[in-house]
Amino acid sequence: GAVVSQHPSWVICKSGTSVKIECRSLDFQATTMFWYRQFPKQSLMLMATSNEGSKATYEQGVEKDKFLINHASLTLSTLTVTSAHPEDSSFYICSAREATSTDTQYFGPGTRLTVL
Amino acid sequence: RKEVEQDPGPFNVPEGATVAFNCTYSNSASQSFFWYRQDCRKEPKLLMSVYSSGNEDGRFTAQLNRASQYISLLIRDSKLSDSATYLCVVNMEGGSEKLVFGKGTKLTVNP
C-alpha cells in the first residue's frame, strides 16, 4: 500500500518556540494532504486540508496564523506550530490522498509534540 | 448530537469470543464509511470500508443501515492481536474529502 512518512516522530520543545513537522508521500503523488490532531483518549480532529499549490483550508476553531501549512509539492506538506505552548502538546497526524483516489487516505505515523 | 458516536467501551473479551461494535452518524448525506483500528500511540490504519450491502473480510463483518444511520463491526473468533481501539469513520458530506472520526472503542482480547 501507499506509504506516508512524518518527521520528526517526536519532539520536545520549550514554550514559545516553533516546530515544523513534515509529511511526505513516498510512493505516490498526493494532491491533497490532511492534518489531524489527537489529544489523549480523544478522537482525531481534522485541523486543515492542504492542497498542493494553494492555501490550506482550516477547520473552525483552528488558528491559521498559529498552525502554518505549506504544501509546496505533490509529495510534501509541512505544518509549523508557531510559538508553541503546553496546550499545543498533542499527537499530530497527517494523511495523504492519492491523486487518482476518491476516498482512501493514507496516514503517516504521527508526530508526538510535547511543549514544556 | 455528535457527528459520529460510538460505544464508549472498553470491551474486554476472551480469545475466541465474538464482539460487536456500533456506531451512529448524524449526517444523512454521508456517503462513505470506514472502520479503522488504532494501536496505542500509533496512527490509525484502515481496517475496512463499509458498503451498503454489508461486507466481510475474514473474521470481520461490517454492516451499514442508512435508514437508521448506523454502522456496525463484528469480529469473530477474536485474537490477542485484535486488541486495539476501533474507530468509526464517516465521510460526512457527499463528494467531500473530510473524514470525521468517532472517539473509538477500545478492545482488549485476553488469553
Image: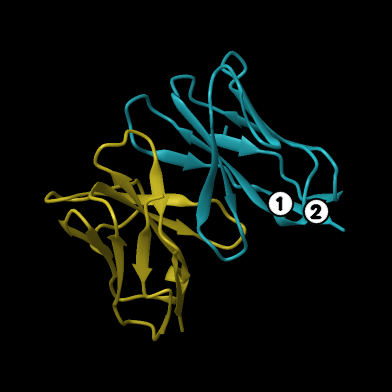
Chain colours: A yellow, B cyan
Q: Is residue A17 left or right of residue A14?
A: left
Horizontal and vertical percent position of residue A49 = 29, 47
Q: Earlier in the sequence, mark 2 or mark 1?
A: 1
In the picture of the structure, the residue carrying the numbered disc 2 is B109
Give residue B25's quadrant in the image: top right
Could you say where residue A48 lies in the image, as x and y percent from the top left?
Answer: 31, 50
State the residue position of label 1.
Answer: B82
Identify which amino acid the numbered label 1 is placed on: Asp
Q: Position of residue A85 (x, y in %)?
A: 40, 75
Classify mark 1: residues with Cα within 10 Å, few (<14), some (14-19) or many (20+): some
| Label 2 element class | strand
Mark 2 near mark 1, Cβ–Cβ under 8 Å? yes
- Asked if B23 appears above or below A76 in the picture, the reply is above
Quadrant position of residue B69: top right
What chain does mark 1 sit on? B
Establish if B91 lies above or below B42.
above
Mark yes or no: residue B34 visible. Answer: yes
Q: Residue at x 80, y 53 (%)?
A: B109
Residue at x 59% of width, y 13% of height:
B67
